[in-house]
Image: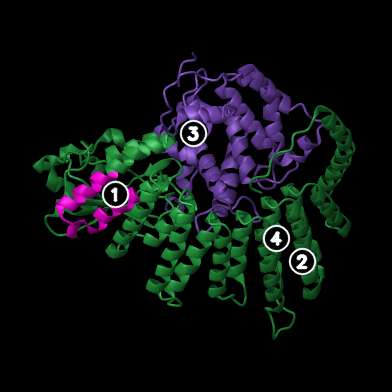
Chain colours: A green, B purple
Amino acid sequence: MHGVKRVKYTREALAAKKEREQAKLKEYQGLTAEVLARKQARDTTQEAFDLTTKLLHINPEFYTIWNYRRNILSDAIFPQRTPAQINDLLADDLSLTTVLLKQHPKVYWIWNHRYWCLRQVPEGPTEADPNGWRQAYWNKELFVVEKMLDADPRNFHAWNYRRYVLEEMPIKRSEQSELVYTKRKIEANFSNFSAWHQRSKVLSSMWATGKLDKTKSMEEEFDLVKNAMYTDPNDQSVWIYHRWLIGSGDNKDILEREIESIQELLDEQPDSKWCMESLVFYKRTLVGRHGSVLSDEASCRLEGECLELLSKLEKVDPDRRQRYIDLSHAGPHYLIAQDRRSPPMWEEVTITANIFNTGLDTYSTTLIPSSQSYKTPLVIPARNLVAKVMLDDQGQGAGGVVAVIRVVQHLHSPALQPQLVQDLQVLEPQAAFLGASVVCKTWYAVSACQYDAKEWWHIRST
Amino acid sequence: MTSVAALDIPLHVKYIQSLGENKDDLVYHMTAHLRMNAVYWGLTALCVMNHQDALDREDMISYVMSCWDDEAGAFGAHPDHDAHLLSTLSAIQILMMQDALDRLDIPRVVKCLLLADILSLQQPSGVFAGDAFGEIDARFLYCAVNALSLLGHLHELDVEKTVGFWVLSAMAILNKIPWINADKLTEFILSAQARLSLLGYPGLEDLDPVYCMPARLIESKGLRKGWKALPRKVLV
């Protein structure tokens, strides 16, 4: 639970607690020894099963015992029972986890067992109605998990579980009712990443299948999120959702309108970090996606405004000062080339990259000519060199940047320009980020480009 | 950092030593399923503080080996506990830090643990399951990648499918540790040596943020990535 204070005990209270614990300890150790001995002896009797129940009541985090219990069920008990009996046994086990989750709502092992139980539900009650039992369970599961979310609306275990239940329901619940549900949760408290996330999932699906008119529904979402932004401009979850709505920023009108709207909010809340941060992001997106229809002057003005905002951010959010400095100095400078357009080619190369962990759908931006009098002396020579950054195939932010390329002044040299085009062309979007290492199959091509090698950090020639 | 709040190293060492001595404490026994991880964290902290010998090496190694689950071919968190990816990574890290990987039947580990278990635990979605029952969690990805890398079998992993991340590790790999306000964070986590080490706290050894093991060891195995800790500060 969030916001619950830890209890502090006095010395006397601690001593008394210790006293009480000794008896418990003895019982616990005895029980543990017995259950583990039975497990070793591959004891799958009802008695052994009941002992696991007892032990798990005391310590639901003892994963080995959950495993043992499942083995007894599937190896010894289920094979001797009718589907109806199995169904009843599973009801008991689900009740057990319900009881335990009430005390320990965030213990992974209890949730795991619950998933497992659901997967074991047999077909029935009749051949004509093979999903009857399942549907009954699933309805109950939704009810239970919603109760848990009432108790703690931000328990991500419960949200994950809920998503699983919804996906696996034999008779699907309408997505519309899910929209209502997430809206209710969001309106109760805007600051709920899980609820916003769930909403984005449902909407994506409904837009894709045409169950909702995307344009109209999106406008409603912009209203909802604007309301939330004005209520609490410091809440990050709201801004992340806004970025999801903006997406790649393909719609110039929406992008410009939202920039204006955030600007208005910033005028009211001049120190709002998220307003400024978002403005930088969206203005750079605007230049990146729509630079070709903007005048050079407009593009440069927008980037200039971004730099101003970044320098203000350094002051209002000093904890992340170095990040803002990097953002203003480096300018946008991402990744691996994939695709390019017709001449003048080297000026309009699209660079594509996988960037994870941004929580964003797509991200794009433009590199400003370094000849301008901005604080970006090392940034890109080509006008409108577009960097486009994507998430993984799930649309999830889950990882790290694949690779970062900073194109340096060397590229001003006309002799290197054709080389750049050629190299970008052969690059595959196959650099993958793996924990700590980058596997870049086309390193040779990239290194030929005279990028600033010092900025390449962990990309190694393989 | 203008002035550095003091990290009481002897006290921390004593505390870590005491963790293994509270055997009449209920909590000690109730948390047995975390023991292997606890030993790893304790040892890592000791290494960072330059007190690796504060816990008996032989005792530790025999403890780790007593957690081997021969049926699964991996390590449990405590003797007689089932094998799990979380404890297996910790066990490998401990053995490596104690320079005792030779106690393992390496071919068996490679064959059973890596091929039979970890790789087959990778789900189509690219995430890893932690055990035979298919518990799925982003943490396991890190564990699997780390274990494979330490044992030199990273190439057996399906890279295309693999995504996932932890923040400080990510920052280190991206060379963006300077983005962290080191002074403030230091104040906030004065007891967390691992991060203090990266943030330039004086007198501590570098900790490799990728493997969460002593940097010197990782470097000697040729596994070091391009991260850079902040410059080591001087106590005023």
Does residue A461 appear in the picture of this structure?
no
Distance from disc 3 to disc 1, alpha carbons, whole Å, reads 26 Å
* Residue that label 4 marks: A114
Which secondary structure lies at badge 2?
helix
Distance from disc 4 to disc 3, alpha carbons, whole Å, reads 35 Å
Q: Quadrant of residue A230?
A: bottom left
* Residue that label 1 marks: A336
Most common SS among magenta residues? helix
Q: Earlier in the sequence, mark 1 or mark 4?
A: 4
Distance from disc 1 to disc 2, alpha carbons, whole Å, reads 51 Å
Q: Earlier in the sequence, mark 4 or mark 2?
A: 2
Which secondary structure lies at badge 4?
helix
Q: Of residues A388 and A232, which is closer to you in this image? A: A232
Residue A61 % position (x, y)? 73, 47
Q: Chain of mark 2?
A: A
Which secondary structure lies at badge 3?
loop
Does residue A291 show up magenta in the picture?
yes
Q: Are marks 2 and 3 on the same chain?
A: no
Does residue B158 appear in the picture of this structure?
yes
* Residue that label 2 marks: A90
Q: Of residues A80 and B20, which is closer to you in this image? A: B20
Looking at the picture, which amino acid does disc 3 mark? Pro
Magenta part of the chain: A278-306
Q: Earlier in the sequence, mark 1 or mark 2?
A: 2
In contact (CB < 8 Å): disc 1 and disc 2 = no
